[in-house]
Amino acid sequence: MKRRLYAIRKMHKLFRLPDPTADEAVNIAFRRVRRAKLARPRQARGITADDLRSFIATEPDTPIGLRNSAMLALGYELLTRRMELISLTTEDVTFQSDGTLKVVIRRGKSDPFGMGRIGYTSKETAEKLKAWIEWRGPDIFWLFCPIYKNKPINRDLSPTTVKRIIKNAAKRTGYDQATVSEFKGHSLRVGAAQELLQRGYDTVAIMRAGGWKTVAVLARYLENASQNVWK
């Protein structure tokens, strides 16, 4: 409903018309709906560090498995959304002298003008990406691309590809269908944020890693984290 109200508000603003959503009757009705719907919004199931290792281990020893392993590892450590991951280009990635990666993420939800944020990875993820790029070759613009008849295709992947890779990996790992359905394209970002919290990183570090602008938004990602402060 919030998205629809926003769309109505935006269209009226574009046509320089009075905003009907600003009417007090609309605001009252919206508050009533929110009070009536007490169920909490369902969050994507976060991928844990153990999940990530298992998912990657089940990928086949094929070019597709090579690509998927690199995508899962990179998406997790960069805390990317689906669109951010598939929008990465080869030029966005720098292999550093210490064996890690420096990546410019340009297509953030909160970054409509593509100014970008900087992310870093482990050496292990850098090695996975290097192996993928060596197979893919230097002439592909997109960092991750489709594969057809065992050849890389120079175009970007669809957002649903990320979700499909995650769900297929969850199935191979042995999760039941009900649990598999809880994994979404956003599970990489959700799970990585929760993992960083459990490892003891502070709020500023997690916000920096994931590009969050407010603590309130980050808190929604962390609310299902398995963290017992009394241990």
Image (cartoon, helix red, strand yellow):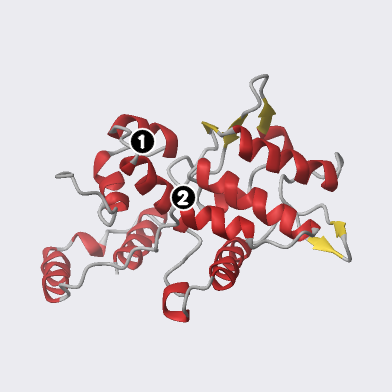
Image point (46%, 47%), residue name: 109
- Asked whether residue 59 is in view, the answer is yes
Q: Earlier in the sequence, mark 1 or mark 2?
A: 2
- As drawn, 24 above or below 86: below
Q: Is residue 86 visible?
A: no
Image position of 116 with respect to 28: above or below: above
Give how far across and how far down residue 190 sits, in percent. 40, 53
Q: Is residue 131 above or below residue 162?
A: above
Name the residue furthest bottom. Answer: 177
Looking at the rendered structure, the secondary structure element under dot 2 is helix
Amino acid of disc 2: Ala
Q: Which residue is mark 1?
A: 207
Residue bearing the label numbered 2: 49
Q: Quadrant of residue 102?
A: top right
Q: Position of residue 148 (x, y in %)?
A: 85, 64
- Position in image of residue 93 (x %, y %): 67, 33
Residue at the extreme front of the image, as rendered: 231
- Foreground mark, 1 or 2, reads 2
